[in-house]
Amino acid sequence: MTEIYRKCYYVYEFNRQEKEMDEFIRNATIEDFKRGYVWDGKKAEFICLICGEYIGGNDDSINTHTARHGNPIERLLMLDKKYTGLTEIQKEFLDMVSNKYSDKEIATKLACAESTVRNMRFALRERARQARAFLAVMELAEEEMPRISNPKLRAFPAKEEKRKALLPRFADLFEPDREYAEVEVKKIIKTIYEDDSTIRRYLVDYGYLGRTNDGSKYYKNCEVNIMKDMNKKELINNYKHQEVEMGIIKVYNTVNGYSFIDICTNLYNPFESIKFRLNLGRCKIKKLQEDWAALGENAFEFEIVEKLKSNEGSTDKEKVQELRELLNMWIESQGKSIKLYK
């Protein structure tokens, strides 16, 4: 009976310590993670975040102990995925990045293309930016703030499908078989969204609302008219909102090895405008223009070296910013092997 009791006690104690350690890790700050340890106020001792060992209250002792687990990033990469959210591949990738491996070396070790490595860099940097914003949102959400009785829509989506899903919410604010003055329509829409002119336009364009020729009166359309107008509007918007591919382009001089690298916001025939300017002698890159004039078009190769994989819902401005970051990362990954026109 004593042996059974002892085993039960060991299991209980192990689970208690594991739960306690889990609580320490989940409540650790960014600085705690970087140091590799936290302070347990109840026991007045430092506790290692990696192995859970108590080290006493001496700074030198805890620093000596955590150093045995490696440098700060090596220690953090030892943590379980439930704390970091990182896969084993991502951990291996970050370990190589911290050790200043080149994209080519990382690609070799991971058995993938260099473009995949660059995309991984970009994706993790984007994730870090999102994490900062998420932390700010969570801190504000958990603060003691006055409750808003009627929360408003913050932004009207740019994506066609999301826009169509939201419009019925606005249309439901209006009663059938009733006329509304423009002032009334504005007031009703503003209970949900401040930009009433945008919503009024879409409600009319999609057939939810009709209005008189002078725009002074509005009325709710019947279901048949809505579907007819939506189908027409959908055809127009599908054309307008076709996804445009963006990326990085390269013009390579096969004679002297120099390259012109730039972002391109539309990869449909991306080199035609460049060739047009070069043939007219209007290229702003003086050395490239001189080489083009001296060697001719046949001395140059044209290549799309990267395509942007942007986040859903990104604005055009955000996509251009992502493109510029992708351009800088691509050039950086080439190291000294690339000669650029400037």
Image (spheres, grey):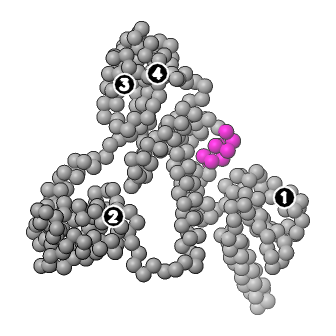
Q: Write the residue at 29% across / 74% down.
A: 187
Tell me what residue is drawn at x 83 percent, y 77 percent. Answer: 43
Image quarter in which the N terminus is found: bottom right
Task: Determine the image quadrant of residue 266.
Answer: top left
| Label 4 residue SS | loop
Q: As rendered, which of 171 and 164 lies closer to the eye? A: 171
Q: What numbered label is drawn on residue 274?
A: 3
Residue 63: mark = 1
Query: What amino acid type should be assigned to the residue bearing mark 2?
Result: Asp
Gap between marks 2 and 4 measured at Cα: 44 Å
* Mark in the foreground, 2 or 4: 2
Give the side of residue 67 with respect to residue 33, left or right: right
Q: Please state which amino acid type lies under the numbered disc 1.
A: Asn
Judging from the image, what secondary structure is the residue with disc 1 in? helix
Q: Counting residues from the N terminus, which is met first, the one under dot 1 or under dot 3? A: 1
Amino acid carrying mark 3 in the image? Ile
Foreground pick, 174 / 53: 174
Residue 55 pos. (x, y %): 85, 67
- Residue 227 in sight in this render: no
Mark 4 Cα shell of 10 Å, populated few (<14), some (14-19), many (≥20): few
Occupied quadrant, residue 303: top left
Total number of numbered discs in the rendering: 4
Marks 1 and 3: which is nearer the front? 3
**Mark 4: which amino acid?**
Ile
Residue wearing tag 2: 195
